[in-house]
Amino acid sequence: MHSSRVTWLNDEIINFMLRGYIENFADNIGCFNSFFMGNLLGMNGRGAPERDIPPWSPTGYYYDAVQTWHNRFQSGLFNLEHLFVPINVGQAHWNFIHVRPREKIIELYDSYGVRESNQIYLTQFARYMHQLYRDVHGDSTVSYGSWAEEWTIRDASANSPVQSDTYNCGVFVILSVYLLSLGHQLSRGSYTTRMIMDNKTRLRIAHLIRKKDERSEDAVNSNVRNWMLGITPASRRKPAAQCDNSRKRAAARATTSRTKRTKREHRIVAGGPKVTTEDCVFSRESVKEGRLLNRKRSAESAGVKTDQDNEQQQLPRARKKKKRKTDKE
């Protein structure tokens, strides 16, 4: 499914984001890849023409094809806090199943809302969970009916953010899975198609894939949602060798700056004691005062007596001659 400019995300991208990033957030999060449901339900490019089943549609139930897939979870599938199963619907749409094994809840989310055609994925996956439960616990006497009574199985698409285009379903799956993995409850207003387009989330996903080897896992795990939604910029970390070189250059620049600043501070007080960095307070008044003190001043303006002044002080004061009055003849 595509428009003139944008195409939908393929299996490789969905699997990379779910298993390469989201599954690594914590030990209690697990993700099947997008081929799980296709193998479980026999979805292939041929379909079943003899039964009028089109290509890439469910053709049956094949538990044996995925019987050992749960072994990849070291703690056990039923001990996971979250399990996510992306579903490629007819090679034209993405939705997913969210399982909380500890709480015994199975939910399906579709960005197009509740649709009757999604029931087959929900019911057949519940059937898989029941059969796996019997295999893991070694109890073949547990019937599906008695097992299902303890579980909540529902289509939660009414609480999913709504997709308003025909090609961002894969992006909706990635963002919704991430939010749910953090324990957030989805709602219609969790995010929108406009937010995805305005913040170029697709380009951000492409950048995450391209730069994965150049970013630490901690930086990626703590910023995926905000960075993809454009809420806050994610920190970009360089390789360790580049970080060491950057720190050395920064330290050298700081040392040079301190040396220059110290020299300027020593010139503030003329003839006085040395001025340390701690004793000096930079302000307009102190800078102005420093300039005045460093400016050359004449002896007269500085109040310093010159040799000529000292010489005049040593000479006796000249007496003024009084005019004598003469008798007029």
Image (cartoon, rainbow, N blue to C red):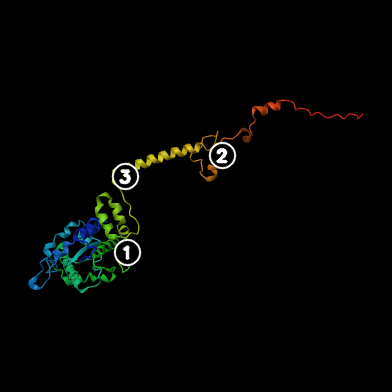
Secondary structure category for the residue under label 3: helix
Q: Residue at x 68, y 26 (%)?
A: 311
Task: Identify whether 322 is placed above or below 184.
Answer: above
Q: Nearer the viewer, residue 270 or 151?
A: 270
Secondary structure category for the residue under label 2: helix
Residue named by callout 3: 243
Residue named by callout 1: 195
Q: Residue at x 18, y 57 (%)?
A: 72
The kind of residue tagged 3 is: Cys
Identify the mark at residue 292; answer none if there is no mark. Answer: 2
Label 1 Cα neighbours within 10 Å, binned few <14 / some 14-19 / many ≥20: some
Q: Which circle's residue, 1 or 2, is located before the other in the chain? A: 1
Label 2 Cα neighbours within 10 Å, binned few <14 / some 14-19 / many ≥20: few
Q: Is residue 145 left or right of residue 288?
A: left
The kind of residue tagged 2 is: Leu
x, y (%) of residue 39?
Answer: 13, 63
The image quarter in which residue 161 lies: bottom left
x, y (%) of residue 185?
Answer: 30, 66
Gap in Å between the C-alphas at discs 3 and 2?
Answer: 45 Å
